[in-house]
């Protein structure tokens, strides 16, 4: 497995993907590393706690935001003296519905999903069910399906009983998830394949949103016009 998948592009430590705590920048985003003199692209995993403190955070966020809220655009890249015109995709969170000093919230232009983009870096995408939780005064909880990752070393039999904090200590990246316990994480080990050191797991967790976003979305969840027809459940 390529290093980009499991090593944080900022700190170099292992990234165990946990909703709200990490992200993965796909290579097709063509996210330009404008802070890099060689002007390469950045793709791969990162810890949001690393992004918050990164010296290149603002430059990174300018590029990432253009893609997240964008509708796709043409970019020109120079390589070995030749200019190449590339199509950068957009993720279409293009309608801004809220902004304050802490964060901005954008609605997707064709699906019932919302992007909460914190000023200090992390972003979270909410679906309709998570929005409805906020509307009922509950945390937006991520319950999505499993992840599959190759561990760098063989954890031995300890993997069978390891808690999430113990697993993160083993992976050498516990400090990248400070105050993780506040989200009431529910770690489930689905399967571990020792021969390939492949772990299949899931983590349900309350997503940590800026207070102003929680407040705004709680009210908004009762008012918005849904795109999908089965929105009566909210
Ligand atoms: Zn990191």
Image (spheres, grey):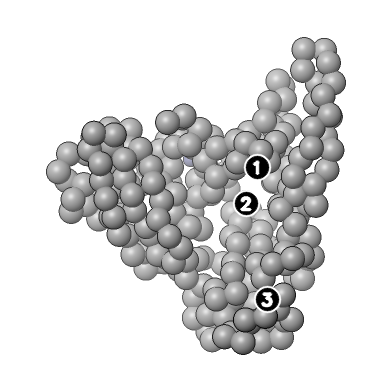
Cβ atoms at labels 1 and 2 below 8 Å apart:
yes
Write the residue at 72% across / 81% down.
224
Where residue 97 appears, as percent x and y from the top left, is: 77, 71
Left or right: 142 in relation to 64? left
For label 2, the crowd category at 10 Å Cα-Cα, with few meaning under 14, some 14 to 19 and many 20 or more, is: some
| First along the sequence among labels 1 and 2 | 1
Per the model, the C-alpha gap separating discs 1 and 2 is 7 Å
Nearer the viewer's eye, disc 2 or disc 3? 3
Per the model, the C-alpha gap separating discs 2 and 3 is 30 Å
Left or right: 99 in relation to 76? left
Q: Which residue is mark 1?
A: 57
Nearer the viewer's eye, disc 3 or disc 1? 3
| Quadrant including the N terminus | top left
Q: Which mark is residue 121?
A: 2
Left or right: 172 in relation to 232? left
Position above or below: 228 against 94: below
Write the residue at 25% across / 41% down.
193
Where residue 20 appears, as percent x and y from the top left, is: 51, 58
Q: Secondary structure at mark 1?
A: helix
Q: Which mark is residue 228?
A: 3
Tell me where residue 13 sits by quadrant: top left
| First along the sequence among labels 3 and 1 | 1
């Amino acid at each position: 497995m390529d290093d980009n998948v499991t090593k944080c592009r900022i700190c170099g430590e292992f990234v165990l993907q946990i909703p709200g705590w990490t992200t993965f920048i796909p290579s097709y985003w063509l996210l330009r590393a404008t802070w890099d003199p060689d002007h390469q692209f950045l793709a791969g995993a990162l810890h949001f706690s690393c992004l918050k403190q990164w010296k290149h955070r603002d430059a990174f966020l300018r590029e990432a935001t253009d893609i997240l809220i964008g509708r796709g655009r043409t970019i020109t890249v120079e390589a070995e003296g030749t200019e190449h015109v590339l199509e950068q995709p957009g993720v279409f969170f293009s309608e801004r519905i809220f902004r304050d000093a802490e964060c901005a919230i954008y609605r997707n232009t064709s699906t019932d999903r919302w992007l909460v983009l914190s000023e200090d870096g992390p972003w979270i995408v909410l679906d309709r069910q998570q929005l409805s939780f906020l509307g009922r005064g509950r945390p937006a909880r991520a319950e999505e399906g499993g992840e599959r990752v190759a561990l760098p070393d063989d954890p031995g039999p300890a993997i069978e009983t390891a808690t999430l904090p113990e697993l993160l200590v083993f992976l050498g990246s516990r400090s990248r998830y400070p105050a993780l316990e506040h989200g009431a994480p529910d770690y489930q080990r689905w399967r571990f394949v020792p021969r390939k050191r492949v772990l299949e797991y899931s983590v349900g967790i309350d997503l940590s949103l800026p207070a102003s976003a929680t407040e705004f979305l709680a009210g908004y969840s009762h008012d918005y016009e849904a795109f999908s027809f089965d929105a009566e459940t909210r």
